[in-house]
Image: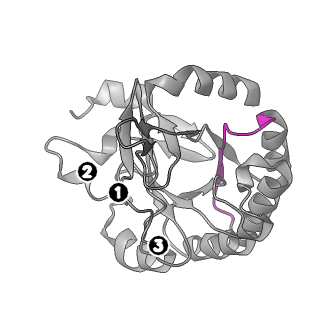
Amino acid sequence: MTLDRDNAERLTVEFCGMAFNTPLVLLSGCVGFGEEYTRVEGFSNRDVGAVCLKGTTLEPRLGNAPHRVCETPAGMLNAIGLQNPGARHVVAAILPKLDFDETRFIANISGATVEEYAQVARIFDDSPIDAMEINISCPNVKEGGVAFGNDPDMSARVVAACREVTDKPLITKLSPNQTDIQENARRCIDAGTDGFAVINTLTGMSIDIEARRPVLGNNQGGLSGPAIKPIALLKVHEVY
């Protein structure tokens, strides 16, 4: 449903120096690379403030083995595994199909090393993308698989590396699966982030009691949905 002019003007907001049509932002992973949902009848890009594209790495990734998604009470678990065609393909083949006059588009960048994050950020810097969301929930392969977002030092290193290669707004997606989200946020601000996405999914598991094994092919996944809203609100308050 398209907003009328009065409502459209009332909902306009500014975030990290960007003018948004509305405060509504479509989350990374929920709308693919920004072109799938546009086929929905009656939908207009002008009704959303921004679209976060699917998580993108330097090289293409096939993602995790199935099952990748399962329903839980008041929520959903997903373990997609960052399936994507790689940053260069997104910039060369997908971004040209998006209408940047209708809304803002935010790249979601991921990596297995600090260097990979910087490389992906550099590729998107040389593109029409409006901003970048840094997904620091990825495991650091050089540090035994510890997620970047669960360690303030690692988080700050990733943000600083991305800040060095781009002047575009950086939005750091903070993980709730850490000891001190306040300290992590503080370190990311010092490293150059312009804003935050609070929070990413919580880690969870679902068990098939008949088969006596995890439902997800990856064993664990990210929990989202109404079940985590009270946790998200607390984390937003703590970061604030």
Decide whether residue 187 is among the magenta residues.
Answer: no
Residue in front for this viewpoint, 118 or 218:
218
Amino acid type at circle 3 is Arg
The residue identified by callout 3 is: 61
Q: As displayed, is residue 75 above or below residue 203?
A: above
Sequence-wise, the earlier of marks 3 and 2 is: 2
Residue 49 in picture, x, y percent from top left: 43, 42
Whether tag 2 and tag 1 are in contact, CB under 8 A, the answer is yes
Residue in front for this viewpoint, 122 or 113:
113
Drawn side of residue 104 relative to residue 123, left or right = left
Give the residue at x 39% y 69%. Answer: 95
Prevalent SS, magenta region: loop
Corner quadrant of residue 210: top left
Mark 1 or mark 3, which is nearer to you?
3
Decide whether residue 173 is among the magenta residues.
Answer: yes
Residue 147 in picture, x, y percent from top left: 70, 54
Q: Which segment did they paint magenta?
A: 167-181
- Tell me the distance, in whole angstroms, between the alpha carbons under discs 2 and 1: 7 Å
Amino acid type at circle 1 is Gly
The residue identified by callout 1 is: 34
Give the residue at x 63% y 58%. Answer: 138
Q: Is residue 240 visible?
A: no
